[in-house]
Amino acid sequence: MRLLPALAVLGLSIFVWNRRRPGSFMFKRNLPVAFYAHGDARSHCEVKHAPGLNSCEDAAFWDIHDPATNSTQQVVLITCDPGRVDWNTVMGPLRNPDPHGNLWLLAMGKESVPQRITFDNYPAGHDFHPLGIAISPFDGDTPSNLFIVNHARERTVIEQFTMSPASAVATHVRTLSSPYFISPNSISLTSSSSFYVSNDHFMTRRLPWGLGNVLPVIETFLTLPLGYVSHITLDPAPTALKPILEHKFAALFLPFANGVSISPDGLRVAIASSTPANVHIYSRNPANNVLKYVKRIPVQFHPDNLDFDATGALIISGHPHFFSLAKMKEDPAKLRAPSWVSALGVATDEVQTLFQSDGTYFSSSTTGLRDSKTNSLYVLGLYESGVLVCREGE
């Protein structure tokens, strides 16, 4: 037992040395109650609530094209899991996998209200604990393919659904499973039937004999480069006996590989590395989805999810104080963790803060989406209730 304190000190020392920015994770910084880059947060931002709309992890814009008017509108799809405090395969605990998570749709517009999506054909007795989400555009005819990472009780899988804007229903198509899906987290589509998927840890909370309480923590705090991003190509036929046609490693040796996003032109891929507080940029060959490392960009918080907006700016969301986030899961109603959302410039590495909070106004930010047409910002919180919406000029 005397070895454990020594290992803890060693791990913390390596963590600090790797990051060389110890203040950003060891101590809470003096953040504002609420800061919004385009105006007073109290008048420009609101939190939209609905029963069950809490502990939301990821969101994606769904592009819906109308051939009759040759126009495209966007809505936001959101994954939430109110039972996250009892079932979190990334941070723990693994107490109770029974309560199901849910999926929500939020239309644009100040008066819009969150709408819960119902499932059709979902397997009876199959868990639903959603994390990453990605959906293909709706072209006016063929239903969109929707993919959601599901941290189910037995193993982590990816669920495939189809959706059409005519109804608030997601029809389950199939469950995708692979030995390479050790800890899937985030998804970014390369087509309607292929995608990148990050795996945040190699050693997970699912390990037996108590190892799941120790080894993932060691991997996290020693920033061991055991995470990775894969590219998956599917057989488009929903009843195919071998749904995964090809698995290729796209990026290896990443500590805590978290969010992944493809730029609008398809030529860049960004990957968040949470514990070292870095964002890695890769160039992408669209012909074969091969990635080539370009650079590392340090950020001032632990990046969680990423999303390129339509202009090519990268929206980065995450956690300024990891220890507060880890503590918050014990009592989300009373404890708070700070939030930070930034935008990385298109042509430069200049980072602009879009939203900040010490956790009082909005806590534990995981995802930020920006509609570049209206400059509206949508923010989710891992243990927070509701969805934060900030609008410029209101």
Image (cartoon, helix red, strand yellow):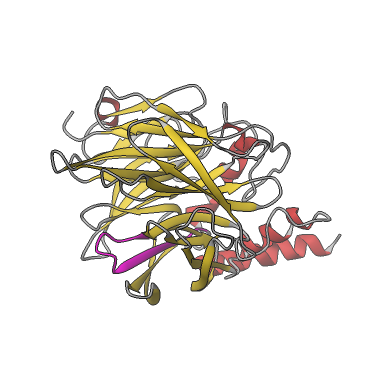
Q: Tell whether position 263 is magenta.
A: yes
Residue at point 79%, 61% (across, down):
4
Query: Quarter-wise, where is residue 38 in the image?
Result: top left
Residue at the right extreme of this rendering: 1
Please indicate, yes or no, whether residue 84 appears anywhere in the rendered image.
yes
- Nearer to the camera, 270 or 240: 240
User: Left of 188 or right of it: where is 211?
Assistant: right
Q: Residue 30 placed where, x, y %?
A: 42, 42
- Nearer to the camera, 80 or 176: 176
Q: Tell whether position 377 is magenta.
A: no
Query: Quarter-wise, where is residue 300 in the image?
Result: bottom left
Q: Residue 243 placed where, x, y %?
A: 54, 60
**Residue extent of the magenta highlight:** 261-274
Residue at the left extreme of this rendering: 69
Q: On the rendered image, what quadrant is the N terminus found in?
A: bottom right
- Nearer to the camera, 310 or 313: 310
Q: Is residue 368 above or below residue 43?
A: below
Query: Quarter-wise, where is residue 66 in the image?
Result: top left
Residue at point 55%, 66% (across, down):
255
